[in-house]
Image (cartoon, helix red, strand yellow):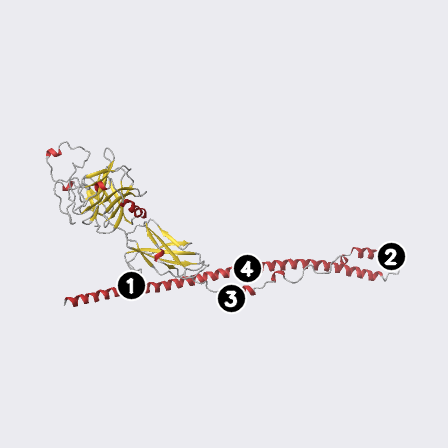
Amino acid sequence: MDTQKEALQRIITTLANKNDEIQNFIDTLSHVLKGVQGNSAKVLSDLDEEFDGLYSVLDEMKESMTNRIKQEQAHKTQELQNQLSQCTNALESSEELLEFASRTMDIKEPEEFTKAARQIKDRVTMAAAFRLSLKPKVSDNMTYLMVDFSQERQTIQGLKFLPVPKAPEIDPADCIVADNCVTVSWQMPEEDNKIDHYVLEYRKTNYDGLPRVKDERCWETVDDIKGTEYTLSGLKFDSKYMNFRVRACNKAVAGEYSDPVTLETKALIFGLDNTSSHLNLKVEDSYVEWDPMGGKSQESKVKGKENKGRSATPSPKRTSVTSRPPVSRGSRDRFTGESYTVLGDTTIESGQHYWEVKAQKDCKSYSVGVTYKTIGKFDQLGKTNTSWCLHVNNWLQTTFAAKHNNKAKALEVAVPDKIGVYCDFDGGQLSFYNSETKQLLHSFKTKFTQPVVPAFMAWCGGITLYTGLQVPSAVRTLQKAENGLSGSSSSLTSNAQ
């Protein structure tokens, strides 16, 4: 019976997974169908725009050529009309002189004939008819009509759609995920010298495999990439994976997207657990600040002699919670007394992890480290054999020390602006770094016998937590050197139980 139920349960699980895949594919098909409708309308509009542009160019060229022909026509017409007017006037004058000469031939009187003949000779010498060029100044051929559009017509008739670039190919083996950066590399299946640029799209997801259409973040776009590689930097890895796809574009059209690839971008993400934090700590998801008034409503009445002479300046002892506060909804009591502690809300049971912490400039005292969850509610970080930390004290004078099992090792380095914490659970190593320079501040070597949680202490100030960070490459590189450390590191080494 139980075996049959297990078999049936496996079948149900398999069917549910297959149904989920089919539903995702249906969503994908519906999304593609809508894309076809929208994209076809867009390319038709683009085609109209391109042809309208071509018509506009042709209309402008026609208007320009027509104007040049009309200008030539007007010029030649004016020249010929001027020449025609001159010839008409010359002909009229010449006909009048010819008629006068004919009449002179009939004169009988010698003196009168001689006088008339001399006048005719003088007029002939000055006649415009003999100074005219009897050749048209311009021809009737139109110079600017010598146009042959046969080649252009052949070119236009040979117009085709610009070839759509093929989909690029992303090889996950060539992509690099490191230092909260992702470098995506791709190549074209065949050479295409018409490609102008590439468009990269990416989005975060918690699903392995192909992207899902529904219940996902929108694709983010990086446009106008000239090369076949691009690096996204400064990412927060707050999801397990990222989807990537890329397409090639020429001057007119974008090609199909590449097959999407999914790259793992997993990093430790956690916040601060305010269900077990000290009541004098004001806790947000990634920020904790000491609040001297935070536990007032929970405090019991203390003896009058304990209250006597209380100063206005708060101190850790005077603001401690003396009564047992109510048990939180979490699995442990709140920290109390002088243990101004808050734990992370995620347990580390294996692997290598990294996070960073930055304190306010006026924070008087804070600690950063890890602890077992069994740490007592009155215990302070570093004062038990189940907690390890770096402690910064800016009260009166600055001290910087590594603490474990109630032993402290002074650190002869400047307190950095931001501290990086590296925890190698399997290797039994807890190291602290200057997050900017990756200078090693201190390393603990131990064998973790229980899961650990990130732990923090703050007094008279606040600290900010940064998670979703990969182990930096520089830290990984330094591990070999760290493994050979001795001296100050080994002085605080223990096998915590």
Q: What residue type is labelled 4?
A: Met
Is label 3 in a helix, a strand or a loop?
helix
> Could you tell me how far apart the alpha carbons at marks 4 and 2 are, in whole angstroms?
69 Å
Give the number of the disc on residue 333.
none
First reached walking from the N terminus: tag 4 or tag 2: 4
**Residue 497: image x %, image y %?**
16, 47
First reached walking from the N terminus: tag 4 or tag 3: 4
**Residue 98: image x %, image y %?**
80, 61
Q: Provide the residue designation for mark 4.
A: 61
Of the 4 image quadrants, the one containing the N terminus is: bottom left
Q: Residues within 10 Å of mark 4 (few under 14, many from 20)?
A: few
Give the number of the disc on residue 24.
1
First reached walking from the N terminus: tag 1 or tag 3: 1
Residue depicted at 38% across the width and 55% down the height? 185
Q: Provide the residue designation for mark 3.
A: 157
Residue 460 visible in the picture: no
Q: What residue type is labelled 2?
A: Thr
First reached walking from the N terminus: tag 3 or tag 2: 2
Q: Of discs 4 and 2, which sits in the foreground?
A: 4
> Could you tell me how far apart the alpha carbons at marks 1 and 4 are, in whole angstroms?
54 Å
Is label 2 in a helix, a strand or a loop?
helix
Give the number of the disc on residue 114.
2
Of residues 185 and 459, the one drawn nearer to the viewer in this rendering:
185
